[in-house]
Image (cartoon, grey):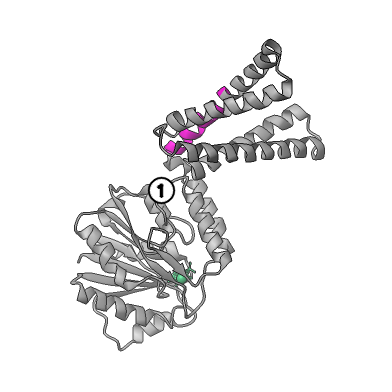
Amino acid sequence: MKLSLVIPTYNERKNILQLLKKIQEEFKKNNIQGEIIVVDDNSPDGTGKILDETKIKIKNLKIIHRKGKFGLSSAVLDGWKIAEGEILGAMDADLSHPPEKIKELFWEIENGKADFAIGSRYAPGGEIKGWGFKRKLMSKTATLLARVYTKVKDPMTGFFMIKRTCIKDKKINPKGFKILLELIIKANYKIIKEIPIIFNNRIEGKSKAGTKEIFCYLQNLIGYLPYKKKVIREFFKFAFVGGIGTIINVLLLYILTEKVGVYYLLSAIVSFLIAMTSNFILNKVWTFKENIRLNAKKKYFQFTLVSIIVLIVNLFFLYLFTEIFEIYYLISQVLAIGIALIINFFGNKIWTF
Ligand code: UDP
Ligand code: MG
């Protein structure tokens, strides 16, 4: 067996058989030695029953009936536990993911061009059809947050394949829906490839993604920090650079005002700009280890914009702590700087670098 494709189902009565037929056709047409493992969470709509009773002959089909709704990620993992293939995959049951792309993901790994292949909606050529503004915005935001950890354009997709050996001895147990990001962070792979796909919103049944998933996702994100020591290292370097910047800022303010005789507000602006530029250069080459020339202009602009936003946030919290919570203004400022630093770091990490 080469490929084990897990399909998690919860209330997919109207979709699952059609999908199974299509996958079987794809396997046959492209000579893929594959098995399909459907993991059903005791769907109230009778998906499990339909699967057991179907007259449609599907080769190499395994069905796991679970007792309750234990969630998408754990369904994929349970499926993989009984998988026999060397390549493990997952795909949604609602016909959103194009079965015609199975072969592309599969051959990428089978031919040794990658050990991890992702059906990507955000890679050039990929697309999402049928989602409203709110859903698109949520997906984009989640993807943006994931950029703290990965440059993969679509770390949220439910359609992907990975070599079994890449997850050997790895503890994979994400909360909620999003298993792919956890694999990207924890699995042991050399080459990851994104294959563009066109995602079509489901026609039958309802989406099970809800507010609970947002919290699971945020919890996951925080939990990944210890796995990415690099991010923590970058954070402390960034904070250190910020410290140097502050010293430069204050020193220049003093020199320009007292020794050169510049009006103090003008010196403040000049010293702020110089300190910010020095911060930018240090962060670019030292914190984020980039070539100084790489997109320098664009990134300098982004860095400046983040700095200005952070300055406003800083003032807002300074005001809030001092006026509303009646904290001594210098202590307020220390707290406000802490918050500003976090926003500054993640803002630049996600957007600029
Ligand atoms: N799913 C599941 N268990 C759950 C939630 C979802 O097995 O608790 C399955 C669902 O049947 C579908 C896939 O996971 O095959 C993706 O779910 P859905 O289409 O609802 O999410 P969306 O595409 O809206 O993110
Ligand atoms: Mg769906």
The quadrant in which residue 259 appears is: top right
> Which residue of the protein is positioned furthest toward the top in this rendering?
259
Question: In the picture provided, is 326 more to the left or to the right than 218?
Answer: right
Which residue corresponds to the image point at 79% horizontal and 38% vertical from the top-left? 325
Q: Which residue is mark 1?
A: 151
Q: Is residue 10 visible?
A: yes
Q: Which span is picked out in magenta?
A: 229-244
> Which residue of the protein is positioned furthest toward the bottom in this rendering?
55
Which residue corresponds to the image point at 51% horizontal and 57% vertical from the top-left? 140
Which residue corresponds to the image point at 49% horizontal and 60% vertical from the top-left? 176
The quadrant in which residue 310 appears is: top right
Which residue corresponds to the image point at 56% horizontal and 22% vertical from the top-left? 244
The amino acid on which the numbered mark 1 sits, given as a three-letter code, is Lys
Up-down: is 200 above or below 337?
A: below
Q: Position of residue 83 (x, y in %)?
A: 28, 65
Up-down: is 87 above or below 58?
A: above
Up-down: is 153 above or below 37?
A: above
